[in-house]
């Protein structure tokens, strides 16, 4: 599990997690010719949700270009999804699902708590993995991760 502080250290740009953004925006990545900045809304009360939003905005820093605010444009939607995928893989790594299973985690609520993410983010990440890999994935020649229903089996 990666902490909020360590996630923020992963980037070498300015960020403000108390930004006065319009309510429809939880976060925003801004890049100009001389500056890059991540803004996270001050209206998000939960530190756990702030971490999920920050991860997505860092995904924009790494993976997207240009102004993609208008989500009616197909290319912008694709870039938004690319940033989210980066965040899912960062905060919900397959190894994290396996370690949670080994730690005795029994359901999605406990898994979200174990990974220190919000449940909606976990559900979206699991759906991303299900679309990417199908219903199950043989992982590291030692595990089978089932995405629907969610579970992990370890080979002998």
Image (spheres, helix red, strand yellow):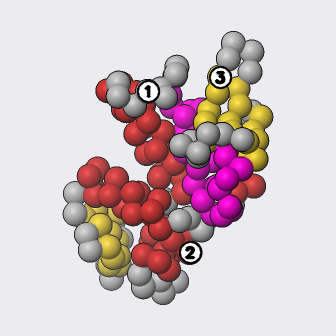
Q: Is residue 81 above or below residue 125?
A: above
* Of labels 2 and 1, the one closer to you: 1
Of circles 3 and 1, which is in front?
1
Measured from the top left, where is residue 155 in percent x and y?
32, 78
SS of the residue under disc 2: helix
Q: Is residue 60 left or right of residue 11?
A: left
Q: Quadrant of the C terminus?
A: bottom left
Instruction: Measure how far apart labels 3 and 1 are at the Cα level.
Output: 16 Å
Q: Is-magenta flag for residue 58?
A: yes
**Mark with earlier residue (2, 3):** 3
Is residue 7 visible in the rendered image? The answer is no
Q: Residue at x 66, y 64 (%)?
A: 46
Tag of residue 114: 2
Question: Could you say which quadrant of the image residue 107 lies in?
Answer: bottom left
Question: 123 or 69, which is in the foreground?
Answer: 69
Asked if the residue under mark 3 is in contact with the one under mark 2, i.e. CB atoms within 8 Å, the reply is no
Q: Which residue is mark 3?
A: 31
Q: Earlier in the sequence, mark 3 or mark 1?
A: 3
* Residue 37 in sight in this render: yes
145 and 140: which is toward the camera: 145
At 68% from the left and 36% from the top, the residue drawn is: 38
Report the side of 124 relative to 115 (left or right).
Answer: left
Q: Residue 73, relative to residue 153: is it above or below? A: above
Find numbered disc 3 in the image and state the secondary structure of the residue it sits on: strand
User: Residue drawn at (53%, 52%), measured in percent from left and top?
Assistant: 90
- The residue tagged 1 is 70
Give the magenta-colored segment's residue range.
Answer: 40-65
How far across and how far down the image is residue 55, in percent? 59, 48
């Amino acid at each position: 599990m990666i902490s909020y502080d360590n996630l923020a250290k992963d980037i070498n740009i300015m960020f403000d997690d108390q930004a006065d953004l319009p309510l429809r925006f939880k976060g925003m990545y801004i890049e100009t010719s001389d500056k890059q900045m991540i803004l996270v809304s001050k209206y998000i009360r939960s530190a756990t949700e702030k971490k999920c939003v920050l991860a997505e905005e860092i995904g924009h820093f790494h993976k997207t270009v240009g102004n993609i605010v208008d989500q009616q444009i197909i290319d912008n939607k694709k870039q938004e999804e690319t940033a989210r995928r980066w965040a899912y893989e960062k905060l919900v790594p397959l190894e994290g699902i396996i370690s949670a299973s080994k730690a005795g985690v029994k359901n999605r609520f406990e898994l979200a708590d174990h990974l220190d993410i919000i449940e909606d983010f976990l559900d979206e990440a699991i759906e991303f993995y299900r679309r990417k890999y199908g219903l199950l994935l043989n992982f590291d020649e030692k595990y089978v991760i089932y995405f629907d229903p969610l579970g992990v089996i370890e080979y002998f």
